[in-house]
Image (spheres, rainbow, N blue to C red):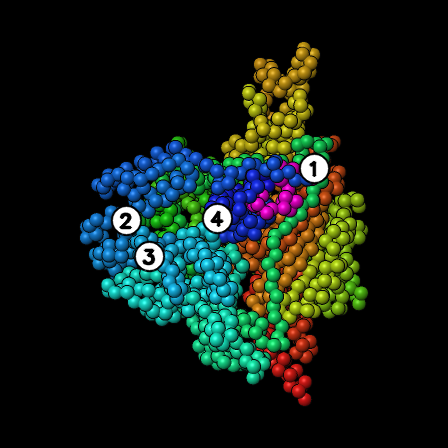
Amino acid sequence: MAGFHASQCGFCTPGMCTSIFSSLVTADNSNRKKPADGFSKLKVSEAENAFSGNLCRCTGYRPIVDACKSFAADVDLEDLGLNIFWKKGDKGPDASKLPSYTLGGGICIFPDFLISELKALHNKKDEANNTDPMENKYHPRLSNTLCDGICSFLDCLKFGSKALENPVDEASKEGWYRPTSVKQYYKLINFIELNESSVRVVVGNTSAGVYKDHDIYNKYVDIGGIPELSYIVKKAGGIEIGAATTISRSIEILLQESKSISSTDESVVFKKLAEHMRKVASPFVRNTASLGGNIVLAQKYQFPSDIATILLGAGATVCLHNAGELQHITLEEFLQQAPLNPTTLLISIFVPHWISKSEKETSLVFQTYRAASRPLGNAISYVNSAFLGQICFDESSGELVLSNLHLAFGAYGTEHAIRARNVEKFLTGRSLTASSVLRAVQLLREIIVPMKGTLHAEYRISVAVGFLFSFLSPLAKGMAVPRISELALSSRQETISDDEHKPIGEPTKKYGVELQASGEAVYVDDIPTPKNCLHGEFIYSTKPLAFVKNIKFKSSLASEKIIRVVSAKDIPSNGQNIGSMTMFGDEPLFGDPIAEFSGQALGVVIAETQRYADMAAKQVKLASQYYFYMETQTALAIPDEDDTMVVYSSSQYPELAQTVIARCLGVPFGNVATAAALCAYKLKCPVKMYLSRNTDMVMVGSRHPIKAHYSVGFMSDGKITGLHLDILIDAGISVDLSPIIPSGVISGLKKYNWGALSFDIKLCKTNNTSKSTMRAPGDTQGSLIAETIIQHVASVLSLDANYVRQKNFHTYDSLVLYFPGSAGEASTYTLHSIFDRLALTSSYLNRVDSIKQFNRFNKWLKRGISCVPLIFGVSPRPAPGRVSVLKDGSILVDVGGIEIGQGLWTKVQQMTAFALGQLWPEGCEGLLDRVRILQADTLNLIQGGVTGGSSSSESSCAATLQACKVLINRLNPVMSKLRLQSGTVSWDNLISEATKENVNLSASVYWVPDKGSNSYLTYGAGISEVEINLFTGAITILRSDLVYDCGKSLNPAVDLGQIEGSFIQGIGFMIYEEHQTNSDGLVVSNSTWDYKIPSVDTIPKQFNVELLNTGYQKNRVLSSKVPLLPASGEPAVVLASSVHCALREAIQAARKDFADSTEQKSFPFTFQLDVPSPMTLVKELCGFDIVEKYLENLLTNEFTNER
């Protein structure tokens, strides 16, 4: 991971490493042939899916994929991206330079101290239960290998359950029970009061991640240890899989069974079932969740299960144990029963063999389908289906006919999966023609009726129709058949580096990356909890403008764990009800006495553990784009001596957090830190608050929603002469930083020369959560508005949008007019050359022609391509810096910028080594490892300012260089003296002598940008090509090419990572991330279940990025030799509009095709494409009834031809 620059903030990195390691071990345990030395048995295709369920907000996934692919036996080393193992210009990639890998993952040692902890935990359980030593009873071996150690740990947790030798006595106690037989299970259940809401029967307990709002439980019954529930029995008629078998193991069994069947026709059911199950959940969930548990969730909680649907389509049956008897029923009957209770056990699932009837020369067909917001990455389906049937040729009609049909549909807003029996009955024995397929579709629409309140109901019905058509159309004559192919991920990174200013300009690995990858990096929640520490969670209003009379809790197990509720009444008399502040105004910590908006904090519930606090906070009764940082808002507040408070906060602005806390507490000394500090102050003990993802998403603001209306004037050649805009910006309840958004919007718009430009922008106060700045605030929205106008003009004039774009590019004179003070010299305006270069290197014109051909010959898939320019303004801010040299020669650096994954510390480290390198005998060689960057705090370094705007790295490096210069001036006299004495002077001798001479080896500065460099423009361009599926609206980004002028990059690897990551985050904003609220303004897309950021399976299939090191901006020079780097963390978000524009082109191609084929010439080619534009919207714009229109058109043409 470190070598491929695959970590930024590092919060997700240990999980990525774990998923990759799991995939390697799984592959190496297979019976594939032994790979070449240094590689695993993993395949490249498997590497791309190894972490499909893991989420990353920083990297854009590409380098993580490369790190995993580097282990694969079939990897093409040329396809691996930028890394530290070989450089561009080398003769070729050398596999021997990669870290060595031992087949099977090697012998990883489980730490001795953890073995001791496990044994101690075992012994503690023994004493509590008065049983024999657990290591003998439950886990006879405890070796020191990593895998065995992990298994020991997990088993310790499971087998730490109550011994069930006397269920009558044990059933009244709290704990985790693990019966080892069906008989023992029922003995236990008989003595537990089944009406208790505190009892939960589980296998993997993965449903806790879905149904988070359910109460905590004091009794868990784990049935995973019952052998009868894990049996695999092969029978003549099929295969029986125990209900407690994991989904991953079920996939293995089905694949093995499919391979054991000689007839391809007969093995298709098992193979398709396994392939579909691989798209369910994520690898780590499938490794834990059980097959039976998934089906029970579908039956009990109306869970939109893919597995229940596909097994229903395959004709599965189930075996139940009830009242001492075994009962065999169809899966369809099981799903229709009353919700399962603990007195009935699901024992097994039976999947039958389907054999073609040879006497009728029939063939078996089986297909499964799903429409989900992600192809693989842990997303539930909008609709899923499975179709099975036997086909034979009818000589009398010359058509194919179907028999023994199973048409199963689920997840469309139904209580459970169903079979469309009316459609089955109609199609059985009938020739497949346009007429019969149309009638089948019409019958299906009568059956697929989502329940009231189902989101995207019409979409789901339309997709179900599309799935049925997809199944039937290949079997009928003369129908267009969709052709969908899987594409492997590939990438290319181009950078230019030189050795002139080493280590500046080198792609060195990220500072501290090994700590991140190993999980040793300490985040706020990793800080050991102090003794007597309590935990807090916000209670928030679910209604706007609600008068809060009091706060009560539902009677539940969670409410019993509450210690105290801290509210506005607990703020000290000399303090203020303030939670956050900006230069524009304050925001209260608690809504008191009126909750002004849904999601406003009313208080903090305090409990002994974070889980108790989280669950209790959800039990309260009361009369855009979300940030989705990996680490939610977290704070630990510890009262200290002399009435002071030590606060650890996951903040980009520690100085502001300190100010707000001081004002709230009324002590001289937004926000979770303030709440934690208030609770700790009131309770006189440490308090930690780690917001759950749900609470964080509800309470924390988001990107500003914007509504824009425009009037534009233009010539027939596409030249725009004037533009007026009326823009409304939803700022939420408080001012926050909203006043800066209009300038960002206009800055994003001004990348084109609009001629006469006027605008009226209004910031609207609404009873919603406060909106705040988020990566490229305002510029992202403004740039998209600009591209929408350009495409609108091009559509009206029937011109190529790229032609219209270039027609309205700035000349240097108009650039100066639009960006006075930041346009720079004419030589720095590189947009024209960048745009031309990108069009050339990406083969843009050839691809445009290819896409036209593709769209002409593909009815159900359409493609679009678009190229957008970038002009992004950057304004560096003042920053403090301190560089200190210790007596042993090590170097400590303090800067105000906060390392949040953007590589700030890495660049500061490089700048320090470069600056002090002139005093090092070998230049900067070896000095890099001596530099240590210290975590910022508000005591050691003041005026740190806020980290944001993509300029903090630049400012911190400038401050560091300035401090180094001070040190160099102090050390030069000592250096000169020593050189006269001995010639060459080592660094250690220099520092030792300087210490003896009492030289001040610590330099503190406050860097302020010069007037000539306090703002500048950066340039870039991006081309994206997308493909849409007209049946589902699914979007595939086939390729994205980005070119960005980086001026002089301090670290190309860091800047590439920033560009790729911000571009993928921009795709999330443009396409995937639906920030939904209810009628009260309460955020309802409040978890990863509902809110989908991009995952590895949604990034561009081919992703190419080029950094141009033009070295311009000569007026922004830190020294006579080193120009500063332009921003890289935010501009590429804007380039994601290329995906949105390409999507518009693809939708337009679909609308035009259907307008032409159905002779609806009035079909509008100009349409509104909102942001985000998920697959549901794409499908709606392409038409919910396109299948019916297509079939009706076929029938019309047949009738015309007959005449």
Instruction: Name which residue type carries label 3.
Output: Leu
Question: Which residue lies under the disc numbered 1?
Answer: 90
Q: Secondary structure at mark 3?
A: helix
The x, y position of residue 1188, in whole percent, is 58, 77
Q: Residues under labels 2 and 3: Cα distance?
A: 22 Å
Magenta highlight on residue 69: yes
Question: Which residue lies under the disc numbered 2?
Answer: 175
Q: Residues under labels 4 and 2: Cα distance?
A: 38 Å
- Residue 582 in the image: above or below residue 98: below
Instruction: Name which residue type carries label 4.
Output: Ser
Give the mark nearer the N terminus: 3 vs 4: 4
Question: Which residue lies under the disc numbered 3?
Answer: 229
Q: Residues under labels 2 and 1: Cα distance?
A: 61 Å
Magenta highlight on residue 445: no
Give the mark nearer the N terminus: 1 vs 3: 1
Q: Nearer the viewer, mark 2 or mark 1?
A: 1
The residue under the point 48% across, 45% down is 25
Instruction: Give whichever of 844, 39 is nearer the camera.
Output: 39
Q: Residues under labels 3 and 4: Cα distance?
A: 25 Å
Question: Which residue lies under the disc numbered 4?
Answer: 30
The residue under the point 56% across, 81% down is 395
- Residue 247 in the image: above or below residue 20: below
Q: Residue furthest front?
A: 359
